[in-house]
Amino acid sequence: MSQLDEDQVLIAAKQACRRESMLAREALSEDERIAKSLAIWRNFLAAPELETHHHLLLYAHHGSEVQTIGLVEDCLKSGREVSLPVVLSDSPHLELRRVTDVDRLSKGAFGIMVPPDTEPAIAYEEIDIVVLPGLGFDREGWRVGYGGGFYDRLLSQSHAMTVGFAFDCQILPAVPTECHDEQLNMIVTENELIRISEGAAD
């Protein structure tokens, strides 16, 4: 098989993972998503790693993703520093912007809520934990996202701990990977906290 054929097979496999995970996630009712999201927050906030990691990059949920706006608010109330990613029209890289008040968030690119541009931009190295959404995950810490590559580019320049938020139905037997994909340190679902040991994919 030629390299082109191998690449096409990999792309098709990722697309199949995206479809499978999206269908499973969309099948959850709104009430189920709310209840499962709350359980994911509890599991995440109970992790001992948070005791020594204080600046969180969370995400503002969109569509059927694990909901996070309430978590952002809870973290701010507890005194943690929180930033959110912002997609810029003229850049392939995410801008990180500090959050001070969830009531000041407004819709940005793709309809995703973002802080106002008057809030300070945050350097990647200031972040202690990056929490990522995604479509599918596996137990070795691999993630398939939406195909834009924004988080892979961010993680390639960051030394932060990486955490994926997922409903149990998004955990797949295996996620196909490419050389630019970044392995996560932890995945949190409503029922478990999956820690990925170093070298798990070796």
Image (cartoon, helix red, strand yellow):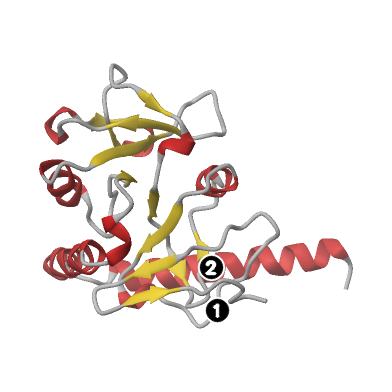
Q: Earlier in the sequence, mark 1 or mark 2?
A: 2
Q: Which mark is residue 174?
A: 1
Expressed as whole percent of the image width and height from the top left, the position of residue 65 reads: 30, 58
Return the residue nearer the eye: 128 or 95: 128
Amino acid type for the residue under numbered disc 2: Trp
Above or below, 85 relative to 185: above
Give SS at disc 1.
loop
Return the residue nearer the eye: 83 or 107: 83
Give SS at disc 2.
loop
Instruction: Write the residue at 33% across / 21% down.
Output: 120
Expressed as whole percent of the image width and height from the top left, the position of residue 37 reads: 20, 64
Q: Which mark is residue 142?
A: 2
Furthest residue in direction top, as rendered: 118
- Tell me if 168 is positioned left or right of 125 in this view: left
Q: Classify the position of the N terminus by image quarter.
A: bottom right
Return the residue nearer the eye: 67 or 196: 196
**Mark 1 vs 2: CB contact within 8 A:** yes
